[in-house]
Image (cartoon, rainbow, N blue to C red):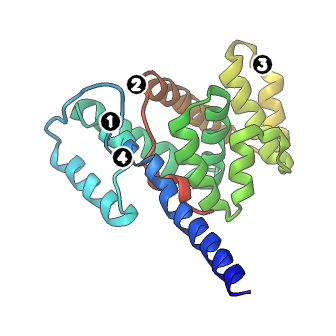
Amino acid sequence: MPTKRRKASNIKADRSQAAVEIPRQTARDDTDITALSLQRGKLAPAMEGYFDKCQEKLGFVPNVLQAYAFDNAKLEPFVAMYNDLMLAPSGLSKLEREMIAVAVSSHNKCYYCLVAHGAAVRALSGDPALGELLVMNYRAARLSKRHRAMLDFAVKLTAEPWAVEEEDRDALRKAGFAERDIWDIAAVAGFYNMSNRVATATDMRPNSVYHAQAR
């Protein structure tokens, strides 16, 4: 019996140790952020302050910001666009905007955005399964009619932008979206299509901390 207890204890310890060691597999992503060798440039005081605020509030600076830091002239508009689309007042909730980010990134198979924004969906929704479903296939999720219409539109705009017609916009209206909301859905989807392509082209890596958030 004592032998069995030791074995069970050892197994438990091994599992615990394995759980702690898993992040080491992605730890390199915190230093080798992209496949490009771009030296950090001189940042404007506003951007230095923004990085400090990220460190204070999040405990880290998102790698996408670090990746853009080689050129302040590119970093500042990227941050401004992100903040406007994702955080500014809108008829879309912050969760809905993150859901669009994940659904678009899932179609584009963007590793960075799926990890980072999948974590945001988990955190904002309080539903880890929803984050995983949107990463894998949003159509498998039990979504409201509003959210299904929103993601159908965003993914169609991603996959077949030339095929978007008035009936697609009308489907959003019938789901309860105002004209401004339709603009915001399109703008968020467009932003992540751009971001996905830049992230994929440069092999941008997400901060390892995202993997364990809101599980």
Disc on the earlier residue, 4 or 3:
4
Disc on the earlier residue, 1 or 2:
1
Identify the residue shown where x is 35% and y is 37%: 33
Is 9 drawn above or below residue 172 in the view shown? below
- Disc 2 to disc 4, how far (Cα)? 15 Å
> Looking at the figure, which quarter contains the N terminus?
bottom right
- Disc 3 to disc 1, how far (Cα)? 36 Å
Residue 167 at x, y percent in the picture: 84, 24
Dot 4 corresponds to which residue? 30
Dot 2 corresponds to which residue? 202
Q: Which mark is residue 67?
A: 1
Dot 3 corresponds to which residue? 165
The mark lying in front, picked from 1 and 4, is: 4
- Local crowd at mark 3 within 10 Å, few (<14), some, or many (≥20)? few
- Disc 1 to disc 4, how far (Cα)? 11 Å
Mark 1 vs 2: CB contact within 8 A? yes
Is 145 drawn above or below residue 35 in the view shown? below
The mark lying in front, picked from 2 and 4, is: 4
- Disc 2 to disc 3, how far (Cα)? 33 Å
Disc on the earlier residue, 1 or 4:
4
- Local crowd at mark 4 within 10 Å, few (<14), some, or many (≥20)? some
Nearer to the camera, 108 or 79: 108
